[in-house]
Image (cartoon, rainbow, N blue to C red):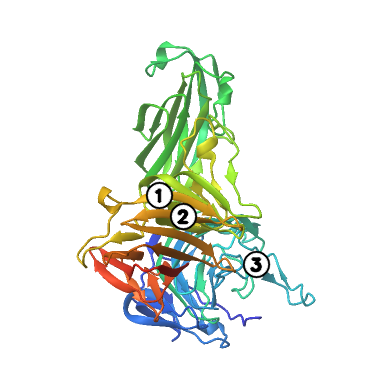
Amino acid sequence: MIRRLLPFFSVLSLAVQGQTVSFNDLSAFKNPSSNWSIAGDAAADLSQNNVMTATPGKGVLVCQHPRGKYGREFDLFTAFEHGDADLEVEFMMAKGSNSGIYLQGRYEIQLFDSWGVKQPHAHDAGAIYERWDETKPDGQKGYEGYAPRMNASRAPGLWQKMKISFQAPRFDAGGKKIANAKVIKIELNGVTIQENVELSGPTRGSLPGEVAQGPILIQGDHGCVAFRNFTIKRFGNQQPQLKDLKYALYDGIFMAEPDYAKIKPVKEGKLEKLAHDVSGKPNGYLLRFTGKLVVPVAGEYRFQVVNNGGNGVLRVAGQEPLKWQWWEGQAKATLPAGEVPFEFVYNKNTDWAKSSLGLTVESDANRPVELHALGSINLSNPTNPILARPGSEPLIHRSFFRINNENVSHGLSVGEPSGIHYAVNLEKGALARVWKGDFLDVTPMWNDRGNGMSLPQGSVLDLSNQPTLALIANDQTAWPTMYGETDGYRFRGYDVDAAGRPTFKYDLAGVKVEDQIRPDADAKFFTRELRVTGSLPATLKCRLAAGKEIRKINDTTYSVDKQYYIQVDGAAIRNVSGGQELVVPAAAKINYSLMW
């Protein structure tokens, strides 16, 4: 729909470069309407459209708004402005709800209940919304919308995390735009879904015109939504840069930095940025760069040094933050504003490594800036990624993997053609993780010597990686992190059905277990069925989930840290040290669904 555009008021520009937007009250916003409130937490109904409840407290920003009541007066504007900025926020969508974050009040990053959408469009979560031209024919009014690379959305009522890196448009001294705004990157739930998207102008429903500084606008007239942990880091337009850069090239392999007064360079010259290729040779040389570093704002600056195959030294403003050091290094220095003396030394003395020279600087006032030339950093062993992808049938893949700081040596991952996947720890009979998107990057396994590891791709949800079934004597008995010799656990392989999906088999405590995990028809969630045969010990329990807080939503649905849902009959919440567990007694058949 076309939204009514009203003249916008001037807003206060805060002096700080980075801040956490406080949700203890609404003072961070201009004239909030009654549909916005501060709460201790929020919850959305998985089955009812646009229903969201709030509990008393602080820390969560909630919009409770009926559908169909549109107007700019329901939107929320920050009391600060931004240009270049990095944003991080967690948000929760009500079922079927719609919202958006307008950068500078003009470029909308879409928030939407897109759970289960097969092919996302420019209105789905993480999209950059369309521009709009009312003069064009119907069906052509919207243009230049950018759908996310994949649908990384989670179910309504769950907290989701978004990171946005934004570059504001540039203007000359006369106010003429000389460069478009750009979305450098958007991550949704750990997945990069937008990258280097140039924005030719404001998206639909925005404030008019384009500006160097503008407020954040949060759409509040399309449904219920909640936010927490909102941080913004703002950057200035000016960046550190090198000036009057010169280089001197010396032949030889140096075990320590030489006395330059006693040796003569074989070549000298001027450069715009650092580069190793002026040496003209692969090894046995030292490059000394001298000049000035232009520092736009006084403060702490952090340097990342790449000096592959040799030693490096960094000196700046009379300090030596990186001493004679082999290979790569990190350093920091507190610098005054203005032009300060700069010196960088690269000594290439290892013949089996490729020359690679890089220097990056960042601060609270600027994003990382490369002070080296394009192509000066080389990969020692570049390789194309080796990816495992399901075809028309599920793909079963054995490998090591790492989860929760633990290396799993007996791991198995199952990739579904529909893009929903899981991994199990066969030593524990544990469902270790689930994810949506691409399947596995197996480059660490098969490139060069390899380390046997596979890496999940897409939006990953790590679970507890602990045994599903265990002997639990009483409510005070801690759930085991692994099986012991007395548990009688033994993995007995798996059968593959006609569709190509495995059923895992193992023995435990004198019973036999068959464990199968299957996707639903819409690839939104997994259903797990455990079939247990034999004489069931009274103390044998099945743990479905573990977390800090498990909430009962209704008779069969539970929320685990508002990161995923469990649907099951007859479960109980068990309080344990550091959190809670969702447990059912062992039975001949145990069925539950995991939704995220």
Give the side of residue 582 with respect to residue 359, left or right: left
Which is nearer the N-term, disc 2 or disc 3?
A: 3
Quarter of the rendering occupied by the N terminus: bottom right
Which is nearer the N-term, disc 1 or disc 2?
A: 1
Q: Residue at x 38, y 19 (%)?
A: 257
**Residue named by callout 3:** 121
| Viewer-proximal residue among 163 and 570 | 570
**Position above or below: 179 against 139:** above
SS at circle 1: strand
Residue type, numbered disc 3: His
Which circle marks residue 92 in the picture? none
Q: How crowded is mark 3: few (under 14 residues within 10 Å), some or many (20 or more)?
A: many
Q: Are marks 2 and 3 in contact (CB under 8 Å)?
A: no
SS at circle 3: loop
Q: Position of residue 506 (x, y in %)?
A: 40, 53
**Position above or below: 195 against 287:** below
Q: Residue at x 66, y 81 (%)?
A: 2
**Residue named by callout 1:** 491
Q: How far apart are marks 2 and 3 (CA)?
A: 38 Å
Residue type, numbered disc 2: Phe
Q: How crowded is mark 1: few (under 14 residues within 10 Å), some or many (20 or more)?
A: some
| Viewer-proximal residue among 533 and 60 | 533
- Residue at the front extreme, as displayed: 534
Q: Where is residue 298 in the image (x, y as percent from the top left)?
A: 38, 47
Q: Do the residues labelled 1 and 2 touch (CB within 8 Å)?
A: yes
Q: Residue at x 27, y 56 (%)?
A: 480
**Residue named by callout 2:** 504
Can residue 405 be seen by looking at this rendering? yes
